[in-house]
Image (spheres, grey):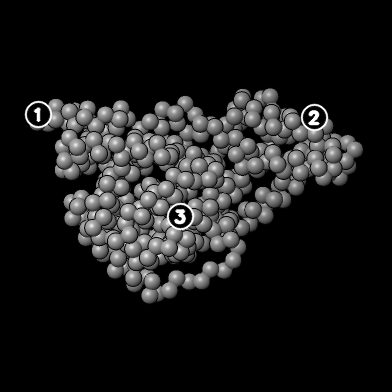
Amino acid sequence: MEFFDSSNPDDGNPFSDMSFLKEIMKSFSQQGGQSAKQIAMTIASGGTSEPNVDPVERMEFENLLRVAELHVNKVTGLPPSRSGSLTIEPVTKAGWATHSLDSLKPLLVGLASIGTDDSENLSNVPSEINEMMALLAPMMAEMTTGTMVGHLASRCLGTYDLPIPRENDRILLVAPNIDAFGEDWSIPKEDLRLWICLHEVTHHTVLGIPHVRKNLNGLLTQHAESFINNPSVIQDQFGEIEIGEGLEGLASLQNVLNPEMVLGAVRSPQQEALLPYLEALVAIIIGFVDYTMDQIGTDLIPSYPMMTEALRRRRVETGEADRFVEKILGLNLTQEQVDRGVSFIDGVVERAGSKGLDRLWVDESNLPTPSEVDAPGLWLARLDLETGD
């Protein structure tokens, strides 16, 4: 591998002088730790100024929220709020990014340590590259976090596009994204807004159940903290670069320094062990939410069938960027996972009626194991055996 110094192209190693990276880090640190938020807002808004949400729209959403709360409570028997009152706030894309960054950032904490492994695993990596990665890692973690949250904000419709528990009783809706989706599909505005409110309230209700929130948060946090490095990826990638061709060489370096390579994110054995439990819990939550919404929306919303097909297709037809975010978070929202959750819920209802679903949320021990998600009859049999029914 042939290196050159930026000040002397004929000789030296560009990574032997780290001053340019240190200057970048200095500039980065002077932003007061707000860089991820600034990046998220910029990506979410496309770098343009967004108009504020009309106060009239806020009142309309508030009225629809109350309708959704009433119906979700009636069908599930569960309290939608934890403190007694849900609030709903339609916001801009940048506004959603700002509010959501603090909630999502802990689940992206694994990014901060990737690329900073000081173990013997890095013994074969040139010291200059090791030092460069140590300098770049914190900045790349912030940039990647901001980028992912910004990307989510540019596309998501509300707080629960991803089934991740939130700590308060406030639901955020991304008003411009909702309006754009409605226009694309020619969906009546009030129907779409009520559907979104039902979706958000039902998710908030289930994810607010203490043992569900505890288990899902625990699994997501363990996943976030269990990333490991693969230093050989860095070594192999740099080993393929010939930095001796002027601007073309630098361009090839920039292409290699993509977030996934630089961060060296690889799934650890601990994460592999967690995934079956995480995927099982997420599957039954999605299945239960879909079932509950069908019970309510079919009679309540005139365009419910057509709108539901479009919105649920949107959920699983995601691009590579969305899948990357899901991978980092430990989620797997594929059609297969959705079908798995739906099959479990349908299997319970077929055997025990809709009341059988109430048993899901009684106690932590009632949550299905990964194998029981694929065999609802076994789950019901276990519960009957434990209770003596």
Q: Nearer the viewer, mark 2 or mark 3?
A: 3
Residue 324: where, in percent of width, then height?
53, 42
Which is nearer the N-term, disc 2 or disc 1? 2
* Residue at image location 37% in from the left, 50% down from the top: 309
* Residue at image location 78% in from the left, 37% down from the top: 16
| Extreme residue in the left direction | 389
Q: Nearer the viewer, mark 1 or mark 3?
A: 3
| Image mark for residue 388 | 1
**84 or 384, which is in the foreground?**
384
* Residue at image location 62% in from the left, 47% down from the top: 139
Residue 265 visible in the shown view: yes
* Marks 2,3: beta carbons within 8 A: no
Quarter occupied by the C terminus: top left
| Image mark for residue 1 | 2
Circle 2 packing at 10 Å, graded few (<14), some (14-19), many (20+), is few
| Extreme residue in the right direction | 10
| Image mark for residue 156 | 3
Q: Secondary structure at mark 2?
A: loop
Q: CA distance from mark 2 to mark 1?
A: 71 Å
**Residue 44 sits in which quadrant?**
bottom right
Q: Amino acid at mark 2?
A: Met
**191 or 7, which is in the foreground?**
191
Q: CA distance from mark 1 to mark 3?
A: 45 Å
